[in-house]
Structure formats: structure tokens, C-alpha cells
Amino acid sequence: MRFEPEVLDELDATQRAQILALVAEVTAVDGTDPLNEAARMSLESGARSARHILLVGPTGPEAYANLQHTGAAETIQLAVAPEARFTGLGTAVLATALAIVPDGATGAVWSFGDLPAARGFARTNGLRPVRELLVMESLLDTVPSLRLPAGVTIRGFRADDEAAVLDVNARAFAHHPEQGAMDTADFAARRAEPWFRAEDLLVAERDGQVVGFHWTKRHDSALWEVYVIGVDPDLHGGGIGKALLRAGMRHMADERGQRVQLYVEGDQETAIGLYRAHGFRTTHKDVLYAPA
């Protein structure tokens, strides 16, 4: 008997548990999580930010796809149980996901970790790479000294900064389909996460105006993340981004962090150069594939 993928707009507790168990198994085998933060948040009770395609076989969940609207694309994240690979189930779930992509949108598939098996799967299914996201890391044992541009101060986030931070974020990441789309609901959801602390969101100010921010994120006692650095695009080249990076690294080191990671688009040469100058090195690569 062949089991068919099921398209779900909402998940019940059993389905959420099945998906999380499948994702944990895939992560343990592949060494990388098949879902990003947004996809994991869409699995929380009451969330309706994604559509879900779930294939459950006689022994449990065998394949899952998470479908989210980001800009002009519907991004798909796919997890296939190790024992169910090379059976056509992954292709079946992918086909179901691509079939429900709305008219006018493009279906695109994330491959986290750029694994050889994923590259082969993409070729087999007629997908080509269209975007790269690099993961870079650095130690926090030596942090460059902080030099603030004239008139700029850096402080912790206050609740009345929200509108200004969202405005800078939207303009700084107008080219970025996920980050640039962050709205008040997204911002509130992240502030509600257990890792959020106002003092970890650094805000750069000049003449009473927010001109940039560096949102740092603690993963555990040792590992931190440059979650987002955004600078008013009208002020690029003025040293604000560098100052925010250094201020954030100093904050993480003062909080006893030992290493820091970040995500950056593979075509953002200026940002990559800044990070390399501060000791960051590429450790991981994610690739977005789209139909050829």
C-alpha cells in the first residue's frame, strides 16, 4: 500500500510531535538541521505562518516539507527519514509542495549544509542553485577596540525603539526576501522567544535618530550569534556597521561568550570582507534551489 503526502494548514499535537521526531532523526544523521528558525517557529501551537506536507508511513513519519511565502517565492524546506531515502518519497513530497505553490510565485528549495546527497537530489529533480547563504564563525577571545563615528552612541534597546528599528531593517534589507519582510508581528514573536533580552539588541543613535542596530543572540553559555546587523542605507560607508559589529562582539565577550556565528548572503562581498577582517571564517553553506 502506498502512503500519500497530506497537505495541512494547521497541525495538531500528534502531527507536531511526528514532525519534530523526524527532524531530530534527520539532524542526528546529517549533522545539520533541515529546518531554519522560521520553519521551527511555524511548528509551534497556534502558528499559521506555513503550510505543511506530511507523509506518514506504517512505522511513522517518513517525509515532511514546510512551505512558506517569502517575497516572490514560496520557500520549501524538506526532511526525509534516512531509512526512507532513495525510495521516491522525498520526490513525492517535493512534487506535492511545488504543486500548491500559488500562481505567480516561484517554488524554491533550501538545502542546509550543501550536502552531497542534497545536490544529487536537486539534480534529479531538475533544480538549480540560485542563492547561497554562508555561515561564518569567529572566536571571542580577542575583540578589536571600539571606535564610534562622530555623534554616534550605542545603547540597549528600549520599547519605543521598535518602529525605528523596523524602519531601518526594512530599508537595509529591501533586497532580502526574509529579513526585509519582518513586521511588527514577526518582531513581537522574536521578542517573545526565551532567548530574547533587550540588552542584547544594541541600537546606534545619532541626533536622537536610530541609524542602525545589532541584534545579538545567545545560543548557550559559549555560543552567540550576530543575529542581525542593520544600518540606515543612507549612511553606508560611515563606519556605523563596523562599530555595531565590534560593540556586539564586546557585549558577547563580556557575557562570557567564547565563539560567535553569523549568516550572510554569499553575494554580499562588502559584508563578507568586514566579517573576515574581524576573524570570521566560513564553516557552513546553505543553498537555495529553484526549478531550472
Image (cartoon, rainbow, N blue to C red):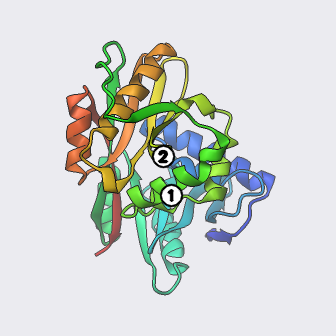
| Image quarter in which the N terminus is found | bottom right
Residue sticking out furthest to the bottom: 103
Give the residue at x 33% y 22%: 146
Q: Amino acid at mark 1?
A: Asp
Q: Position of residue 20 (x, y in %)?
A: 65, 46
For disc 2, the neighbor class at 10 Å (few under 14, some 14 to 19, many from 20) is: many
Residue linked to disc 2: 210
Q: Position of residue 44 (x, y in %)?
A: 71, 50
Give the residue at x 38% y 37%: 262
SS state under label 2: strand
Up the image or down, 174 lies above or below 107; here it is: above
For disc 1, the neighbor class at 10 Å (few under 14, some 14 to 19, many from 20) is: some
Q: Position of residue 192 (x, y in %)?
A: 70, 42
The earlier-in-sequence mark between 2 and 1 is 1
Residue 49, picture quadrant = bottom right
The disc placed on residue 252 is none
Q: Nearer the viewer, residue 99 or 173?
A: 173
| Image quarter in which the C terminus is found | bottom left
Q: Nearer the viewer, residue 178 or 134?
A: 178
Q: Amino acid at mark 2?
A: Val
The residues bearing labels 2 and 1 have C-alpha atoms spaced at a distance of 9 Å
Give the residue at x 26% y 35%: 275
Residue linked to disc 1: 167
Q: Is residue 206 left or right of residue 158?
A: left
Up the image or down, 266 lies above or below 141; here it is: below
State if disc 1 and disc 2 touch (CB < 8 Å). Answer: yes
Foreground disc of the pair 2, 1: 2
